[in-house]
């Protein structure tokens, strides 16, 4: 947005959620996205404020409390504790959590209501019409679709009561002018167009009080009425800042930089809220961003439909970083996206295990073997000519631009481009060959240094998305994640990693999720080899399945991603407690590694030692019967027969098969 980059503060909000039942991954989606943006802005050195909260009044909450045979206050207290716990599980770094039942909030709602009433923007009348309680919306005739609420599809109730009205219609032209003058105010543009055509059809005055129940904030001048819950709720964005108090946070952080939400409540945020602010003489927020819906088999998730996924269960099963990363990459920002557990597993295996985890693991294995486990000294030559430094600078440019327009999946994609480039660079440079010749050894050290730098830069750029793994990457490459400066863009200067640091290679940062781990949940990949992981030897069917390839034909580029190499088996043992598994130690130029293969019924361990085999060298690590397996042997099978793929003549380990 214009001028945003010059500002020293950044204020972002999520919707305040209804504490009417357990939140699901749809709510987690918005909150994780806002958290990622807030973390990014903090990393850029901005004085950032991130607000979330709960919308605790209204008929919907009152009814859910009734159902639970509790008082509304008891009910919201209970739900509030659950919601806070969910944000703890997802490591949401909010600065403030506002509950609309807090006195600091009621005070501001009453003050604004009173002001609008005194200045003649609110008047008394009677409401006769439709109301959708689950959405807490008054519905106009023209909004109803086949007699149902356009948002939730349920039939609205007919209500008739004394009520106060807000003269929205007075502000219609000012609103249209404002949106025309500030095209970035409502985003994406498709939502702006929807809002503009909605307002052009004519704004009606809005009913802003209720008298048929009392679970809400009382009008300061007419205690028979409670404030309509949406007016109450929207005001949270300024009451949380202490609006009206001299020297409050309001003076420091308002106007908000981003109100983030899904599309069904853009109208409240982009039309009703700005008009309240205009009437109250308060500056408008800079941007209202309405993202799409996460849908399950084409249907919007909702508590009442019962088609919801609990984010805490997913975190338990796949880890926090995998769930957060998946959500952030799940759908083009702004558009709807389909949720499936398969997609989560695929995303984790492809981006995090195969690409990122493998880069770190391979690099550290080579640093241990060829550079005594220390960050090597790179060539003093021009950084600008080193391909990974060039790609890192390009990725940062793209990342930054995409973050600014809140295109988070694309921003993370820019980091993955860097990681992909680095994996390719290892194969192009073959550092294991360069180290053998004293003339090319310094070049090998530069290659290793640049790979470590890439891991560092990728980790720094992934910190907003994932609170855990990037810190572990920094630790493994020898840094102290609590001490190292991750400020953007300063931390990206190439050469930030001090040579001489001792690296700490650990277990793979993202072990690939194998079919056993799926536990037969929705989208579980089928396991072809019983309980002993026999699927790790075979024709590559499983790899293809895991990567979700649908067509029978693949391009050469697809094939080239599979790194097939000759390797020598140096040790072989049975895996205890299984009939089918052998544990092989194989030799590759970058070091020794273990592969677990389901060949014990066809080959004895002593037959394997000294044999040249063909392996998939870039298969992400997996744990099979508790043994780490880093790669896969190639074998041909026919009926019950299984024969290893071998070479006609001998070639040194590491030779490429293509
Ligand atoms: N209480 C109101 C908001 C008041 S803000 C002043 C409300 N609450 S809600 O609990 O229903 O939350 C709606 C929001 O949750 C959506 O706008 C979106 O941010 C998030 N999501 C809920 N389900 C979602 C999906 N299936 N997909 C994406 N986001 C979803 O409305």
Image: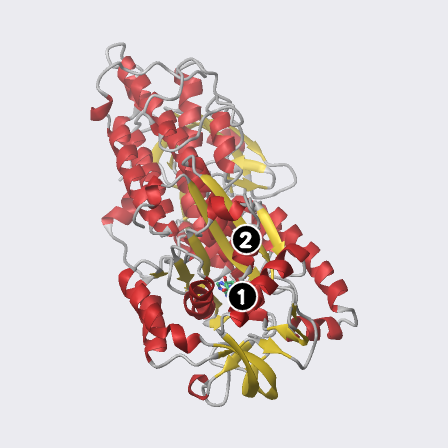
| Above or below for 156 versus 430 | below
Q: Quadrant of residue 204?
A: bottom left
Q: On residue 115, which mark appears? A: 1
Question: On the picture, is 527 further left or further right than 412?
Answer: right
Q: Nearer the viewer, mark 2 or mark 1?
A: 1
Mark 2–mark 1 Cα distance, whole angstroms, equals 14 Å
Q: Dot 2 lies on which element?
A: loop
In terms of depth relative to the viewer, which is nearer, 547 or 68?
68
Disc number placed over residue 166 in the picture, else none: none
**Numbered label attached to residue 243:** 2
Specify whether residue 633 is in view. Answer: no
User: Where is residue 256 drawn, in percent x and y?
Assistant: 44, 52
For residue 374, what is the image quadrant?
Answer: top left
Mark 2 in CB contact with mark 1 (< 8 angstroms): no
Viewer-nearest residue: 298 or 57 = 57
- Locate the C terminus by quadrant: top left
């Amino acid at each position: 947005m214009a001028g945003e980059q010059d500002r020293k503060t950044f204020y972002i909000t999520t919707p305040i959620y209804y504490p009417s039942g357990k939140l699901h991954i749809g709510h987690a989606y918005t909150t994780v996205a806002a958290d990622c943006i807030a973390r990014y802005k903090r990393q850029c050195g901005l004085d950032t404020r991130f607000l979330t909260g709960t919308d605790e009044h209204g008929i919907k909450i009152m009814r859910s409390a009734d159902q639970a045979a509790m008082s509304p206050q008891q009910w919201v207290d209970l739900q509030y504790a659950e919601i806070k716990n969910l944000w703890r599980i997802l490591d949401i770094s909010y600065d403030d959590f506002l509950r609309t039942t807090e006195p600091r909030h009621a005070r501001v709602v009453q003050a604004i209501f009173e002001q609008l009433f005194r200045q003649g923007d609110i008047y008394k009348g009677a409401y006769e019409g439709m109301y959708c309680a689950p959405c807490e919306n008054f519905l106009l005739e023209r909004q109803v679709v086949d007699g149902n609420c356009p948002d939730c599809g349920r039939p609205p109730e007919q209500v008739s009561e004394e009520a106060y009205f807000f003269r929205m219609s007075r502000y219609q032209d000012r609103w249209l002018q404002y949106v025309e003058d500030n095209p970035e105010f409502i985003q994406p543009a498709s939502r702006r167009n929807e809002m503009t055509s909605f307002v052009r059809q004519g704004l009606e005055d809005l009913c802003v009080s209720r008298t048929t129940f009392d679970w809400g904030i009382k009008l300061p001048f007419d205690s028979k009425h409670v404030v309509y819950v949406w007016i109450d709720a929207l005001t949270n964005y300024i009451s949380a800042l202490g609006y009206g108090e001299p020297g409050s946070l309001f003076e420091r952080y308002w106007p908000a930089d981003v109100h983030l939400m899904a599309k069904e409540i853009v109208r409240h945020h982009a039309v009703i809220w700005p008009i309240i602010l205009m009437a109250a003489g308060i500056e408008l927020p800079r941007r209202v961003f309405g993202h799409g819906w996460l849908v399950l088999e084409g249907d919007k998730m909702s508590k009442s439909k019962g088609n919801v996924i609990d984010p805490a269960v997913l975190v338990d099963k796949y880890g926090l970083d995998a769930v957060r990363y998946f959500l952030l990459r799940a759908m083009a920002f702004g558009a709807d996206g389909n949720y499936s557990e398969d997609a989560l597993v695929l995303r984790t295996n492809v981006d995090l295990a195969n690409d990122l985890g493998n880069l770190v693991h391979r690099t550290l294995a080579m640093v241990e073997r060829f550079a005594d486990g220390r960050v090597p000294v790179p060539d003093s030559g021009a950084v600008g000519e080193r391909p990974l430094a060039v790609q890192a600078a390009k990725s940062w440019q793209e990342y930054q631009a995409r973050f600014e327009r809140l295109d988070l999946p694309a921003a993370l994609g820019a980091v993955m481009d860097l990681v992909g480039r680095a994996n390719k660079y290892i194969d192009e440079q073959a550092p294991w060959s360069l180290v053998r010749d004293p003339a090319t050894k310094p070049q090998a050290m530069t290659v290793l240094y640049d790979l470590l730098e890439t891991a560092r830069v990728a980790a720094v750029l992934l910190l907003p998305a994932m609170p855990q793994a990037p810190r572990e990457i920094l630790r493994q490459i020898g840094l102290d994640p609590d001490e190292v400066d991750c400020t953007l863009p300063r931390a990206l200067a190439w050469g930030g990693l001090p040579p001489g640091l001792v690296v700490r290679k650990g277990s793979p940062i993202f072990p690939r999720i194998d079919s056993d781990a799926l536990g037969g949940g929705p989208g579980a990949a089928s396991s072809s080899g019983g309980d002993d992981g026999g699927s790790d030897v075979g024709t590559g069917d499983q790899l293809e399945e895991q990567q979700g390839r649908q067509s029978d034909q693949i391009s050469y580029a697809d094939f080239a991603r599979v790194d097939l190499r000759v390797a020598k088996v140096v040790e072989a043992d049975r895996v205890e407690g299984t009939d089918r598994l052998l544990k092989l130690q194989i030799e590759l130029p970058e070091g020794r590694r273990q592969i677990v293969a389901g060949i014990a019924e066809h080959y004895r361990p002593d037959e394997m030692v000294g044999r040249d085999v063909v392996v998939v060298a870039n298969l992400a690590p997996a744990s099979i019967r508790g043994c780490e397996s880093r790669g896969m042997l190639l074998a041909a099978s026919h009926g019950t027969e299984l024969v290893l793929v071998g070479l006609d003549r001998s070639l040194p380990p590491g030779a490429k098969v293509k």
